[in-house]
């Protein structure tokens, strides 16, 4: 038999939940809509690959993850893809 205990959330957890709810979700949608209004849907969508590069760089810097040559090659391909998609 399992029992479930509810523990009062500390202020740190409350701030983290607010950050996830407001910072990532609401702010992300607002910035996305701002980008769509200013540069259009197609150009905005082409930048989605940049988030992968940012995630890899954050993992290397913050978590100390290894950075491989394959990741460098893939990052170059993403940047080239964004460039070609936005070339007018």
Image: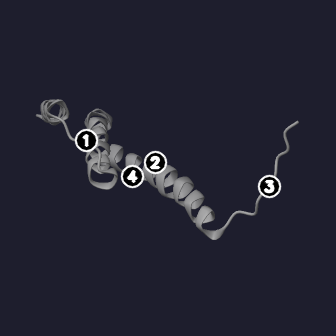
Which residue in the structure is indicated by mark 3?
6
Instruction: Please name which of the two marks, 2 or 3, marks the residue nearer to the observer.
Output: 3
Q: CA distance from mark 1 to mark 2?
A: 20 Å
Q: Secondary structure at mark 4?
A: helix
Q: Is residue 29 left or right of residue 68?
A: right
Instruction: Please name which of the two marks, 1 or 3, marks the residue nearer to the observer.
Output: 3
Which residue in the structure is indicated by mark 1?
53
Instruction: Please name which of the two marks, 1 or 4, marks the residue nearer to the observer.
Output: 1
Which residue in the structure is indicated by mark 4?
31
Q: CA distance from mark 2 to mark 3?
A: 32 Å
Q: Are marks 2 and 4 in contact (CB under 8 Å)?
A: yes
Q: CA distance from mark 3 to mark 4?
A: 36 Å
Which is more N-terminal, label 4 or label 1?
Answer: 4
Pointer 1 local density, CA inside 10 Å: few below 14, some 14–19, many at least 20: some
**Residue 77 occupies quadrant:** top left
Image position, residue 80 (x, y; %):
12, 32
**Residue 3 occupies quadrant:** top right
Pointer 4 local density, CA inside 10 Å: few below 14, some 14–19, many at least 20: few
Mark carried by residue 2: none
Residue drawn where x is 28% and y is 42% of the image? 56
Q: Residue furthest right?
A: 1
- Whether residue 88 appears in this view of the structure is no
Which residue in the structure is indicated by mark 2?
29
Q: Are marks 1 and 4 in contact (CB under 8 Å)?
A: no
Image position, residue 17 (x, y; %):
59, 57
Image colouring: one colour
- Quadrant the N terminus occupies: top right
Q: Is residue 87 left or right of residue 36?
A: left
């Amino acid at each position: 038999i399992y029992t479930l205990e509810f523990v009062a959330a500390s202020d740190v957890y409350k701030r983290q939940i607010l950050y996830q709810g407001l910072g990532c979700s609401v702010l992300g949608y607002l910035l996305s809509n701002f980008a769509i209004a200013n540069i259009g849907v197609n150009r905005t969508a082409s930048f989605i690959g940049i988030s992968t590069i940012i995630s890899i760089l954050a993992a290397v810097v913050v978590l100390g993850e290894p950075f491989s040559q394959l990741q460098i090659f893939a990052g170059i391909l993403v940047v080239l893809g964004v460039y070609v998609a936005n070339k007018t």
